[in-house]
Image: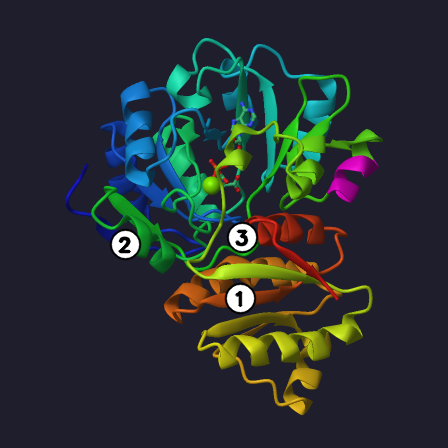
Amino acid sequence: MPKVTRYIKIHPRNPQEKYIQWAVQVLLAGGTVAFPTETVYGLGANALDGAAVQKIFLAKGRPGDNPLIVHVARREEMDRLVTRVPARAERLISLFWPGPLTLILPRSRAVPDQVTAGLDTVAIRMPRQPVALALIRAAGIPVAAPSANLSGKPSPTSGIHVLRDLSGRVDVVLDGGRATVGLESTVLDLTGDCPLILRPGGVSREDLEQVLGQVALDPGLAGEESGLLQPRSPGLKYTHYSPAAKVFVLRAGLPERLPAALARLVGRARAGGKRVGLLITTETAGEYCRQKIQPDYLEVLGSRGNPRQIAACLFDALRNCDRHHLDLVYAESIPEKDIGLAVMNRLLKAAGYRVIRV
Ligand code: TXA
Ligand code: MG
């Protein structure tokens, strides 16, 4: 593993050419470069070089059977990575690329086994963040990149998150500011009869259905809560997004019930000597103040009516919980509409599916 990590602040929208060239040289020499995308930061290596890709697994402590997403900067670059591009993939690409949509397609032999973990499919996406696009375009190769966190931690949405997790484990960190979407891309499997969402993310199911008609959700996603089914995307059985604290999700029939329920939970936790944090929404924030609820940490994630705002700060909030050395965290649930579906998927994982109904 590299001992020295070069940390470079790069302009998020007009990346400096010399920094891009440094990073390109590292990629072409088989090294690892963390870079911003619009979803979360990625940890990249040359996707056509199995030994380089291996370094990603080592740096993250990632299980070898969890395949990586290959990032491209031009539509034509995907032709050598897959055996064919179906018409519905072309439609999605013209509408959602560059952007937070990953497509699963049958792989070609150009893709090393290390990337796909031996599967006969490959995951491909074109990010829209200018640094990511400039880097991949200048490198002239497809770039394999999982989220740039230590395995099991929340995905990084800032360069500092990456540095805290991977300093001394990767060659370069390009810090291009905050990731605007804040959670990962939607992973859509197009190899079956019906398009199947393996991981909800930055492009909503509603958006996809507008284009494709019916889009199914991997039944494993819903089943996870009951522990009945395994998700189809190998990564989802591993990713926990977990802070050190024990997280609980509060599901309320009526959001107005939340403050009173949380007042009791916080009171009980603090009486037991526990440090407790709350992740709440703007709609209930005033009531917490009125009821004088005093957790050790409180973060207002955003409005229930604007799940994109909540998505943008969720992972930062989960990391903040660690920095405040909390024992318990209670998080409000939000409606599973639009990107709210992805927010709840990540929150429930962070909570290990511990749900309190009020
Ligand atoms: O937004 C994102 O997707 C970010 C940025 C960096 O692009 N990347 C990301 O990568 O989240 P990662 O490795 O953390 O998550 C990739 C997910 C995993 O759940 C993995 O199992 C799944 O995609 N995946 C990759 N290849 C697959 C395949 N061939 N079949 C099914 N699932 C696959
Ligand atoms: Mg990840």
The residue under label 1 is 329
Asked if residue 348 lies in the magenta stretch, the reply is no
Picture residue at 46% right of the left edge, 49% below the top: 155
Magenta range: 205-210
**Tag shown at residue 350:** 3
Residue 291 can be seen, yes or no: yes
Give left or right: position of 202 versus 239: right
Give the mark, 1 or 2, whose residue is nearer the N terminus: 2
Give left or right: position of 114 versus 288: left
Dot 1, how many residues are within 10 Å of its Cα: few (below 14), some (14-19), or many (20+)? many
**How far apart are the two marked residues, 1 and 3, measured between alpha carbons?**
10 Å
Label 2 is placed on what type of residue? Ile
Give the mark, 1 or 3, whose residue is nearer the N terminus: 1
Give the dominant element type of the magenta stretch: helix, strand or loop. Answer: helix
Q: Quadrant of the C terminus?
A: bottom right
Give left or right: position of 56 versus 36: left
Of residue 179 and residue 329, the one placed in the foreground of this image is 329
Picture residue at 30% right of the left edge, 56% below the top: 164
Secondary structure of residue under mark 2? strand
Label 1 is placed on what type of residue? Val
Residue 96 percent location from the top left of the image: 66, 38
Residue 294 percent location from the top left of the image: 55, 85
Of residue 143 and residue 250, the one placed in the foreground of this image is 250
Q: Nearer the viewer, mark 1 or mark 2?
A: 1
Secondary structure of residue under mark 1? strand
Up the image or down, 356 lies above or below 281; here it is above
The residue under label 2 is 8
Picture residue at 43% right of the left edge, 48% below the top: 41
Label 3 is placed on what type of residue? Ala
Q: Nearer the viewer, mark 3 or mark 2?
A: 3
